[in-house]
Image (cartoon, rainbow, N blue to C red):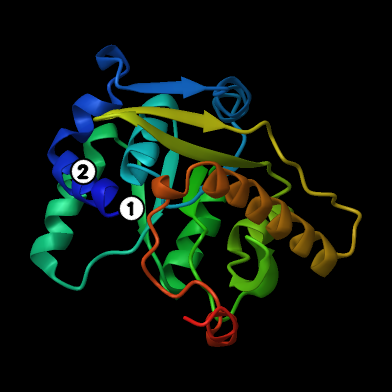
Amino acid sequence: VWDNLGRLGAEYPHLAEITDPRSGRLELRNSGPVTDHVKSGRPAIVVSGHFANFEAMHVRGARELVRTATVVRDPNNPMIRDALEHFRKVGGGERVGKGHQGARSLIAYLERNFCLTMLVDQRMNRGITADFLGHPAQTPTAAAQLALRFDCPLVVATMERKRGAHFIMTLSDLIWSEQTADRHQEIARLVGEINQRLGTEIRRRPENWFWLHRRWSEEIYAQAGL
């Protein structure tokens, strides 16, 4: 994990090259379904976790798609924030900050048929409890709620570091909500499916997942003796 973190930091100035299809550094798999959907003028939501070089995921997505907006958490230090924005914008697309104003912006982007991208593996105290890697975890619901509200598909993306600054980015097929189902049950189903897909990737390559915070409740850590 620490090895990957060090590489991630060193790769920020090289995001343009890494995400350039001509460089051969980022192999994109199964991009057809979401690319065709968005280019036809309809919205979609791509979700992922902090895998490998997670910054490269949304930069490459912005290169591939016509209209993208990515949810980001800006650092408190304005100098670092400006530097990150400089690197993140090399592929185009828009960035949306977290928070109440950001949530309103996401709705506006979906109304304009954008593709939203967001990382959803973090702890969200105001989320719902869902299984994550075999333990109950407070999980964000925004992606599922928006997919249900706008009747647009979800796509789960993963990023795997192969060697050095070479990656494989894989996109799932389109995941649709059931519009006639009970709203709360359908949100829980979509959140559960996202967690299951992310968890499968984490179990396959745990060193590929960047997470240094307490993802689960303190009770879970106490039971594990941590």
Is 152 or 131 nearer to us in this picture?
Answer: 131
Instruction: Using the image, determine if residue 216 lies above or below residue 154.
Output: below
Whether residue 214 is visible, yes or no, is yes
- Callout 1 secondary element: loop
Q: Quadrant of residue 32?
A: top right
Residue 7 disc label: 2
Amino acid on which disc 1 is placed: Val
Residue located 41% across and 20% down the image? 27
In the rendered image, residue 50, in percent from the top left (x then y), is placed at: 41, 52
Density class for disc 1 (Cα within 10 Å; few <14, some 14-19, many ≥20) is: some
Q: Is residue 132 left or right of residue 60?
A: right
Residue located 55% across and 81% down the image? 125
Instruction: Using the image, determine if residue 87 lies above or below residue 179.
Output: above
In the rendered image, residue 211, in percent from the top left (x then y), is placed at: 40, 61
Q: Which residue in the structure is indicated by mark 1?
A: 1
Residue located 78% across and 48% down the image? 177
Q: Quadrant of residue 40?
A: top right
Q: Is residue 91 left or right of residue 151?
A: left
Q: Quadrant of residue 52?
A: top left
- Callout 2 secondary element: helix
Cα–Cα gap, marks 1 and 2? 10 Å
Density class for disc 2 (Cα within 10 Å; few <14, some 14-19, many ≥20) is: some
Instruction: Using the image, determine if residue 86 lies above or below residue 127.
Output: above
In the rendered image, residue 202, in percent from the top left (x then y), is placed at: 53, 49
Residue located 25% across and 30% down the image? 165
Mark 2 or mark 1, which is nearer the start of the sequence? 1
